[in-house]
Amino acid sequence: MLVLKNIYINYEHLVFDYTNFICGPQQITVISGNSGAGKTTLLDLLYSCKNEFCDYSINHHKPNRNDLLNMYYCKQEPLFEEHLTVQDNINLLYAIYNIERDIQLEENIFKALELEHTYHFYINSLSTGEKKRLTLVCAILSKRPIVLLDEPTASVDKKMKQAMIQIIQKYLKDKTVIISTHDNDILEIADVVYHIENHQLVTEQHINDDEIEINNFQSKNLQKYYFKTWKHSKLYHIFTQFLSILIIAFIAVGLFSMNSYINQQQDNLSSAFTNQFVVYYPLQEGLTYSGNEYPLTEDQLSALQEIDNIKDIRNLYYFSSDNFIDASFITYNGNEYESEEVISYISYDENNDVSNYIETSINDEGIYISNELAQALNITAGNDTITINLPVPQYNIYNDGYVLDSSDYTSPLYYIVYPNDHTIEVTLKIAGILTEDDIGMDVYPSKYTIYIPQSTYESYMQEYAVSDSYNTGDIEYKPYEVNAYVIQLNSYEDYSEFYDDVTDLGLGVESNFSTYMNYIENQQSTINNTKNIMLIFSGCMIVILFVMKFVKRHEDNHFFVYLHKLSLDTKDTLKIRLHCMIFNILITFIFSVILSYAIVLLLSYLQITTLSLSYTNIILCLVLSLLIESIPLLFY
């Protein structure tokens, strides 16, 4: 038995004033009254299963979700999934209420109500009368123990009204049926009639007080009907699905290509970047390193060593035959050679890999000789040693050399420092011949250059070092101190901060540094522009796809709204929605990976680029599939 006690509803006007409604099982209960009296309001209250406006009970207990699922409510405005055909709507009803299809019953009712021609029609193509009759069909086929009918014969012609009344009598006689109407023909088949008078529900008929049979059931296989709704606008869904796959594939391959391009550019930067720079104390602001500079002060050297971006710092020994006359003499293969060109002697770090700069390897260790000097000496692999007069200065000489001011030749612009003339004759192994004049150091060597291992130079400097000082007139002789350092940075990305730190100390960086700075900035700008273009393109494509999905969100969401209106639990509808979303994600992901692979193969075949599909690319496809298929749900 269904009981509503003390019903009080007052919206903008009083509808029910503390009245009661009782409905028994296996009875047709009719609610009669003028338009606006509250007939539909009462049915809505019955279907809500809430105690908000009354004391509501079914079989002597407060109604729960399962009680609501045992009701079928045919509203005045027919409720269907409009993106399914009539047949699919009926089949969805069977799935929702977990009912075995009764083909004979179905055919009989469709024939009686002259609906057999509508099986494959979409709902929106039916007339108002056909929709009304179809709602009654659904109420019967749902086999719910409680059926609510709101003005079932409205907008139906006399012939069809009689057919509908006969159907109600024949197929709903064992159900609890509650009908709101002012149709006298329906009043005649009622077991109990309630009249709404003065905001009260009044009846004098006998009401069955037995319990209503309530069933437990579980819906099944509803997901497939969601995808069947796509048939209603399948071209649109196919297009958006294909567009999703296409966009994801192009973004994945594009980002992967961009990443490959960026890595290549960064490799180019790394290989072009010397990573070693000469730092010195310039005699005058803006002057390049000449070898005649003052040594760094203790404070400058200490501050230089504390710069974070420096990987390594070492002394630079850089001398030339301009200052050391004997250094122009070389003995090779028994022949003494005096160079008319300036020969530079430079220390290099043998721990660094210099293989990229070597044209010919002769020994595993030793000195490297520039290509032009090797040609002048006619160096061959069979003779792997050379005797040179190696500059090893003992003193720095001050106040003996200066540069005059061009505007006043009587006064020096600045004084210079130069090492004293001291060479030692040494025989060293030749490690190899260079392809270019340098081995990755930012200095300006002469075209005739000999690179001495750092450890070798250090050993000679220590062996011939002096500790005393002396003066000759105004000229000062102080024990030799290094006046330049080779700085090795961690990465080319540190160059800008390094340059700022060094210049803040009043020190200079060999002028070649500015060339590298410009090159790096240009390459970095290219990389950043590539990233921005790809990100903007990807963002625009995703936004377009989101807009398309957003425009159709109501259509996609209609199915789940329909389930909710049929009283399916919110958790159940969310679960179904999640299953459908996962299916969409998998379809999008799988085909986007396949398309990505096809694009990569095509690019390789056309020799445009050589890429290979990686796990990163596959993960990116999965992430994009998740985003594209799930984020639009936030707008439902």
Image (cartoon, helix red, strand yellow):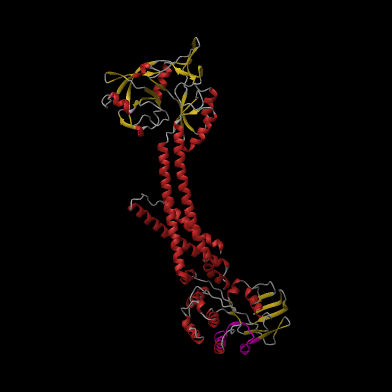
Which residue occupies the extreme left position in the image?
382
Pick the residue in front: 145 or 442: 442
Q: Residue at x 43, y 60 (%)?
A: 245
Q: Residue at x 36, y 34 (%)?
A: 356
Figure quadrant of residue 274: top left
Tell me if residue 373 can be seen. yes
Which residue occupies the extreme front position in the image?
407
Figure quadrant of residue 162: bottom right
Pick the residue in front: 258 or 400: 400
| Residue 279 percent location from the top left of the image | 48, 27
Pick the residue in front: 70 or 258: 258
Q: Vertically, is 293 above or below 439? A: above
| Residue 505 percent location from the top left of the image | 54, 28
| Residue 408 percent location from the top left of the image | 51, 19
Q: Vertically, is 336 above or below 159? A: above
Q: Residue at x 41, y 47 (%)?
A: 260
| Residue 165 percent location from the top left of the image | 57, 87
Q: Vertically, is 214 above or below 356? A: below
Rendered-image quadrant of the N terminus? bottom right
Indicate yes or no whether the magenta region holds residue 166.
Answer: yes
Indicate yes or no whether the magenta region holds residue 154.
Answer: no
In the image, 101: left or right of 30?
left
Which segment is the magenta one?
164-192
Tell me if residue 424 can be seen. no
Figure quadrant of residue 381: top left
Rendered-image quadrant of the C terminus? bottom right
